[in-house]
Amino acid sequence: MKHVVMFSGGIGSWVTAKRVAEKYGTSDLILVFADTLTEDPDLYRFIVEGAANVFGMDIKFDFSIPNLVSGTELDAQRGHRKVAIRDMQVEVAKRIPGLTWLIEGRDIWDVFQDVKFLGNSSIDPCSLVLKRRFLRAWIRASFVPAIQDMIQKRGVTLSSQDAIHEAVKIGIAVDNKVKNIIKKANRSKSPEKERLLAEAEQIKLPILEAERSVADELRFYIGYDWTETARWDKAKRYWEPFQVDCPLVDPPLLHKSEMLGELRKHGIAIPNLYLLNMPHNNCGAKCVKAGHAQWYRVLEVARDEYAIAEQLEQEWQHHCNSSNTILKDRRGGSTKPLSLMEFRQRWEEFPDAKKQSIQAAWVKNFGVLPEELTAELQSLGIDLDDTSGCGCFSGV
Ligand code: SF4
């Protein structure tokens, strides 16, 4: 049985990997990291040192990743950064064979442009394309013989990076066929409707059967903890027929601070975003699914990063000729776009003394803020009770 841990860069995924390694050893352990190329530079340090630690190695991170700066050269900088990350991935694969580092090739902003849809708190094409779908394709290309045959018949060698991309294409072709038939079924009446739905099931069947044939040989692990059981339930459905476990829902139940303490005990520095009191270590804290509360933190403690996201949101709007935004203003029971620029401007207009009280409360009592200030901000369309977050592996 292979034990595959979705190693995301979140502290939960590292503790999960440690628990799986402790229980089953490391000979059949694979840590898999699906890189969105939008990560905080320090996440890569944590991935490398954390993975090495799980496999009993002592490796210090000695790579350098260019920082991005907002402005006219941002696209070129993103390109250079992707090349640096790809070079690092190749080198790390030699040093830590148990770490599988998947790079689809685009960052989240490339995906938003390609699909002409800007991710938001309820729809996340970024994690679908760069994480869930790419991981599934990797599973199929790596472990499912029937899909491997299909890939090879298309003239692609299994050991190449193209094999995963080919598996993505196979999956998309099936999904599209199924979607079209279901659309037709929804416009039809019985008994045509039932016939079409049965046809759609038949199209999915060969891939499902192929996955079922190896499902007992693989077990997947996600770092959701005991506060995230709803996400685990979703993930179980999403990754069927494979088994998904979340060891952190079992005792000893740990709070994030205890997990970070464990990391320290192993001599690994706490990832930068946690030191900034960010709830998640994904996509440089600029997650499109995160709520106002996290974006407020980015604005307060990582203003340069916020400026980059603000610029990229504007560029996306220009490119797609759309006024859609990541954030929403939900005042008065309706939902209106709220651009990162407007969110920043509203925050900047808020009195400094009140901002400091919020900042102090956040640091002292993470996420629990003075009620009267929260209400005052809500009247401006900034909702610091909006604390939604990623959950990239569970689907929406
Ligand atoms: S962390 Fe957020 S922005 Fe990044 S891939 Fe996941 S959902 Fe998208």
Image (cartoon, rainbow, N blue to C red):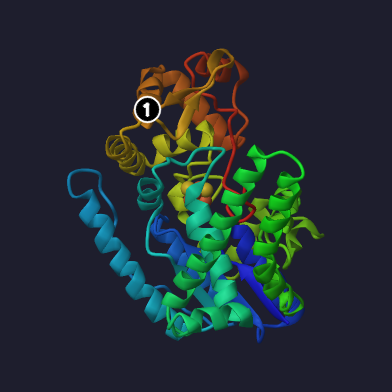
* Residue under the point 35% across and 31% down: 322
Q: Front-most of 193 and 45?
A: 193
Residue that extends furthest to the front in the rendered view of this protein? 191
Q: Which residue is mark 1?
A: 344
Callout 1 amino acid: Arg
Say if 141 sits above or below 282 in the image: below
Task: Pinpoint residue 200: horizontal percent, then vertical percent.
Answer: 67, 56
Residue 217, given in percent of the width and then of the height, sits at 73, 80
Residue 279 horizontal/vertical position (percent)? 56, 45
Please give the count of numbered marks on the rendered protein.
Answer: 1
Residue 203 visible in this rendered orientation of the protein: yes
Task: Judge left or right: residue 4 versus residue 381.
Answer: right
Q: Residues within 10 Å of mark 1 (few under 14, many from 20)?
A: many
- Horizontal relation, residue 353 to residue 149: left or right: left
Residue that sits furthest to the right in the current view: 251
Does the numbered disc 1 mark a residue whose Cβ is under 8 Å from ligand 1?
A: no
